[in-house]
Each structure stands twice: as C-alpha cells, then as structure tokens.
Image (spheres, rainbow, N blue to C red):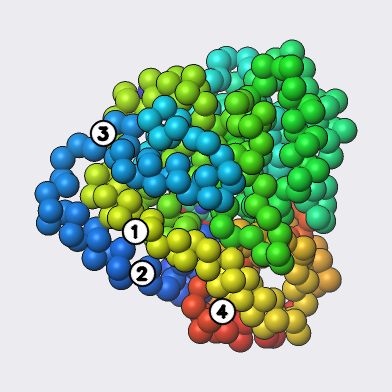
C-alpha cells in the first residue's frame, strides 16, 4: 500500500497539545476555552436527549435551528437567507469547509489562499486534485495586497478563500477589502469560501465584514460558521454553511453521502438556546477584556504584540531575543518555560520565519496570569 497523503502528518494542534501535556505546560496553543460553557445549554442538551431527540436529524439540519440561524443573520447582517434552501447544519466548521471545497473543486482548478492559512485549507484543496495559489498577507499587519490577487487570477481560478477574523493572525477584513473582492470577482465564475467561525470575536469597535452583508458576494459564496466558537463548546463540533440555493443543493449532494446528518440532540439544544442573543452580543466585550488583560500581563517581557482586531488569538514577535525558527522557539518555550504557543510558519507552504508565535487567550484569567508569570524571565 502506498500512502495517498505521504506529505501529511499530524496537525500542529495535535502535536503542540501533546507536547504541552508531556511537559506539563500551559496550553495556549490549540484554540479552545478552558473555562466552562453555559450550564443552561448543557441542561438543554440533557433535556433534548431525555425528550427523545436521539434518532437521525433531518439531513439538512433541524428545521427549527435553520430558522433560528436565518433570523440571526437577518438581525446581524440584514441578510435574507432561506432556511430551507440556503442553510445546512454540519458537524463543525471544518466539515463545512471540506464539503464546500469538495463540492466545487476538480483536478487542476486553482484556489487563491492567503497565508498564513488555517491548517485545513491547503490539504483539502490538494486532496481534491486542485492547486493552491498562495499569497502572503503583508507582514506585520497581515493585510491583503489586492494588486497581487489581481495578478494571480487566471482562467483556472475557481475559488478564493477568505477568513475574517483571521486565524492565526487575528487580522480582519475591512469594507474596502470586501469592495475590492466584489470588483475582482464581478462577471467571473470565481466562487468564494468565507470562513467566518470567529464572526463574534471582533474588538476595538470594529464591525465583522461578513459576505452576508453583500448580496453580490453572497451569490457566489459558501459562508462557514461554528457553534463551538460562539458557545464555548469546541468539542460539540457543530457548525453550518450558508450559500445560494444552487450552491446549497450541490453542497448537500456531497454532505448526504458523507455524514448524512449531524448530532441531533445538540441541534435541538442550540435551537432552544438561540433566543438568548446576549450569549453572542456579549462575546466581543468578554474576549476583548481577555486579550487586553493578556497583552498587559506580557508588557514587561520581550514579546511584542502584533496588531490584531479579532479571533481568540494574539500573535507576538520574539525577534528582539532570538533568531531561532518559530517551531524550535515554540518547542523551547514549552520545554523550558512551560507555556505552549503555535508557530506561524506551519501556516505557510514555503519556509517562512517572521519570528512570530500565536497564543490563544480564550482562557481563565488565572491561566493567563500563570502563563505570564512563567514568561516573566523569558530572555
Ligand atoms: N476555521 C477556522 C479559522 C478555525 O479556527 C476553526 C477552528 N478553530 C475552524 C474553521 C473549524 O471549526 P470547528 O471546530 O467547528 O470544525
Ligand atoms: N481551530 C483551532 C485552532 O486554530 C484548532 C482546531 C483543531 O485542533 N483542529 O487552534
């Protein structure tokens, strides 16, 4: 047997989480909250199971949950989305991304990907026989050069992947970015995959630029979301994909033969919880506080924060103290200082070293304080 994916090992998140466990380090690597989720939602999950919602859900997702999502995007983005024909519930955001790319891509198609790129994009493109066309976000603000995008579009360009707020950098797209994207794709057959799993994690009074705000973009987009990020339950693996009726129909053709339907009790629980709009309206404030707290704690260390307006990650440069490559530095940080972070280099196809690490601040203040204490003597 010859491996179909000989270049692929474990993801960086698995690798660094294992290392953190091995060295008893504080894990600010993999992105997940270490504080409890709302017990009301846990009780609703319990109730859903007790009430007998234990058989296959509708393949497209629980109708009530899809209606709740349609209401939500109307409130947030003034988008008119049809719950029957434009929303599919999926086992997580990653699955929604995998399905959207697999629905569209054929061998030889090109996909424009901005680097650093969230880890699943490029392998999924390549598994479908398509070709990633990588464009680096401009260091250190991680903005898109639309001139470069224009110059890399070809007759083979099938899709562009955007991700705002961005993992791993925390950068966000502006209205002007969205206008550029509209202008570049107008009168083309290029589709967009918009990864918006951090839609609510946006700070400094900025506004989340969803493709849902722009009907012209939405016609050509798959917009992917994750309840794990919104409700602090990454282990529930529940997400959804919004797209035009035509694209949704194609998406569901793949979805029905992959998992067919998504864990039913959690769909009932979340549908019954979604009336609580405060759960997502309050998120920015809660998480901005954590970010500011963490940055302040590290103020007297040699780690320099980079500009970031969203996600639950903050990147820091260690350029003033070391020229080591990012992965070696991240491993040394775990082993010698007991704090785990993620090297940004792994999110680039070509070897890169900007001397930047990503830290997840979706943690209890006591965890962040303990990590800062351990980093106090970093040299
Ligand atoms: N996209 C991005 C940018 C993410 O950071 C994540 C998860 N951290 C996902 C997609 C996947 O979400 P899920 O865990 O729901 O699969
Ligand atoms: N998305 C999470 C992160 O960026 C990790 C998810 C995973 O482990 N695949 O940290």
Q: Earlier in the sequence, mark 1 or mark 3?
A: 3
Give the residue drawn at x 58%, y 44%: 78
How far apart are the alpha carbons under marks 1 and 2? 10 Å
Which residue is the site of mark 3? Answer: 58
Of the numbered discs 1 and 2, the one sitting upstream in the chain is 2
Which mark lies nearer to you, 1 or 2? 1
Which mark is nearer the camera, 4 or 3?
3
Element under disc 1:
helix
- Note whether residue 47 is visible: yes
Q: Position of residue 217 (x, y in %)?
A: 66, 31
Against 166, residue 260 (above or below) is above
Query: Does the CB distance between marks 1 and 2 fall below 8 Å?
Result: yes
Label 4: state its secondary structure: helix
Which residue carries the number 2 mark?
38
Q: CA distance from mark 1 to mark 4?
A: 29 Å
Give the residue drawn at x 74%, y 22%.
186
- Which residue, as the protein is rendered here, is positioned at the far right? 147
Q: Which mark is residue 368?
A: 4
Look at the picture and state if 321 lies above or below 240: below
Q: For the residue labelled by badge 3, is the local secondary structure a helix, a strand or a loop?
A: loop
- Give the mark toward the camera: 1 or 3: 1
Marks 1/3: CA–CA distance? 19 Å
Relative placement, left or right, of 261 versus 181 is left
């Amino acid at each position: 047997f010859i491996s179909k994916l000989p270049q692929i090992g474990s993801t960086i998140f698995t690798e660094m989480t294992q290392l953190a466990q091995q060295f008893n380090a504080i894990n600010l690597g993999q992105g997940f909250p270490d504080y409890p989720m709302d017990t009301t939602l846990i009780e609703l999950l319990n109730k859903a199971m007790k009430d007998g919602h234990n058989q296959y859900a509708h393949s497209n997702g629980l109708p009530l949950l899809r209606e709740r999502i349609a209401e939500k995007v109307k409130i947030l983005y003034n988008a008119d989305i049809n719950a029957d024909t434009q929303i599919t519930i999926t086992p997580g955001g990653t699955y929604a991304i995998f399905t959207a790319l697999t629905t569209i891509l054929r061998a030889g198609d090109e996909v424009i990907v901005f680097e650093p790129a969230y880890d699943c994009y490029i392998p999924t493109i390549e598994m479908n026989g398509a070709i990633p066309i990588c464009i680096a976000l401009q260091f250190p603000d991680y903005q898109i050069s639309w001139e470069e995008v224009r110059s890399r579009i070809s007759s083979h360009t099938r899709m562009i992947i955007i991700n705002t707020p961005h993992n791993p950098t925390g950068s966000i797209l502006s209205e002007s970015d969205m206008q550029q994207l509209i202008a570049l794709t107008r009168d083309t057959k290029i589709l967009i995959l918009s990864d918006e799993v951090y839609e609510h994690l946006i700070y400094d009074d900025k506004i989340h630029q969803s493709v849902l705000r722009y009907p012209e973009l939405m016609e050509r987009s798959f917009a992917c979301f994750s309840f794990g990020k919104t409700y602090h339950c990454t282990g529930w693996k529940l997400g959804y994909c919004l797209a035009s009726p035509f694209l949704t129909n194609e998406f569901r053709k793949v979805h029905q033969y992959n998992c067919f339907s998504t864990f039913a009790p959690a769909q009932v629980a979340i549908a019954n919880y979604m009336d609580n709009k405060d759960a997502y309206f309050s998120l920015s404030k809660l998480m901005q506080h954590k970010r500011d707290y963490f940055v302040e704690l590290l103020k007297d260390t040699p780690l320099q924060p980079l500009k970031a307006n969203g996600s639950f990650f903050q990147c820091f440069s260690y350029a003033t103290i070391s020229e080591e490559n990012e992965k070696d530095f991240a491993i040394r940080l775990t082993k010698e200082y007991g704090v785990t972070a993620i090297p940004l280099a792994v999110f680039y196809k070509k070897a890169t070293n900007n001397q930047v690490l990503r830290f997840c601040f979706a943690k209890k203040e006591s965890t962040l304080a303990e990590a800062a204490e351990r980093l106090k003597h970093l040299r």
